[in-house]
Amino acid sequence: MFTIGCHLSASDGFLSMAQTTVAIGGNTFQYFSRNPRGSKARALDRDDIDRFNAFAEENGIYKILCHAPYTMNACSANPGLRDLAKEMMAEDLARLSYIPGAMYNFHPGSHTGQGTETGIDEIADVLNSVLSEDIKTPVLLETMAGKGSEIGGTFEELARIIEKTDLSHKLGVCLDTCHINDGGYDIVNDLDGVLEEFDRVIGLAKLYAVHLNDSMNPLGAHKDRHQKIGDGTLGTDTVKNIINHKKLRDLPFFLETPNELDGYAKEISLLKSLRYED
Ligand code: FE
Ligand code: FE
Ligand code: ZN
């Protein structure tokens, strides 16, 4: 089963995102839990969620991914901002409890001068304060490009966050193909080797989702600029290898490419044509 979708605007609600997904040929989607650059969440509309859950079940939409806002920084040197990260994450996860099968993804954060090791401790502290046994939604750490003081640009950094989190069985990883290219992992020439390294450092059992993006920048650029599928450093052949790889093909793939809906529909149809049959 090929699970494919794209990032959608959440402004019209869950049922609308599911209907859009069907219209563009997808069977999953990603959305921001709240304004990506702000912090306030929309009011929870239980009727919309009930209608969404019924529609999703009927139409085979599943494994949707909720993305935390970019402004959430679990390793700011400012303790008030770390507390805000705890509040936002706890509130987002409480809302996701109404959507069976959903997952939650966040950027580990950027330290603001305290260094990577302290940053990792602070991220684990946020997770330790938010996670509890009754939270059923997997919480995914996104692989980052290693831009500036970003944490999560190497598999080792993500592994250390996971190790320091008490309820680490609640955590997973979302692999962003643009970010890991920019982080220096050569998935163009050695996808097998990169996945072996992921397995050795983090464990492939922790890999829950893929952000499928081409990159505007060369290997190891530490930039993070997404490109349309086939138009960047990765190219169509690499993307084809990724969506068909035996260690990846059963994961949900989310496009975050610079597109409007018609562009996403075209990319989804291209990806379906590149996908080998199950
Ligand atoms: Fe992201
Ligand atoms: Fe991403
Ligand atoms: Zn990115």
Image (tube, rainbow, N blue to C red):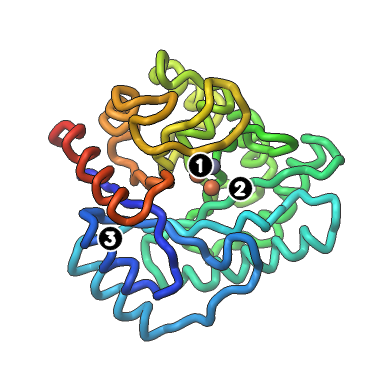
- Identified at 54% across, 72% down, the residue is 94
- Identified at 43% across, 46% down, the residue is 258
Distance, label 3 to label 1, CA atoms, is 23 Å
Lower sequence index among marks 2 and 1: 2
Q: Secondary structure at mark 3?
A: helix
Lower sequence index among marks 2 and 3: 3
- Quarter of the picture containing the N terminus is top left
Residue 212: quadrant of the picture: top left
Distance, label 2 to label 1, CA atoms, is 10 Å
Query: In the image, residue 186 lies at what x, y percent?
Result: 48, 18
Disc 2 marks a residue whose amino acid type is His
- Quarter of the picture containing the C terminus is top left
Query: In the image, residue 247 lies at what x, y percent?
Result: 33, 30
Is residue 128 rendered to the left or right of residue 17? Answer: right
- Local crowd size for mark 1, using a 10 Å CA cut-off: few (<14), some (14–19), many (≥20): many
- State the mark number for residue 173: 1
Q: Is residue 170 visible?
A: no
Is residue 81 rendered to the left or right of residue 67? Answer: right
Q: Which residue is mark 2?
A: 107
Disc 1 marks a residue whose amino acid type is Val
Is residue 177 shown above or below 92? Answer: above
Q: Which residue is mark 3?
A: 21
Query: In the image, residue 24 lies at what x, y percent?
Result: 24, 56
Q: Secondary structure at mark 1?
A: strand
User: Does the beta carbon at disc 1 come under 8 Å from ligand 2?
Assistant: no
Q: Nearer the viewer, mark 2 or mark 1?
A: 2
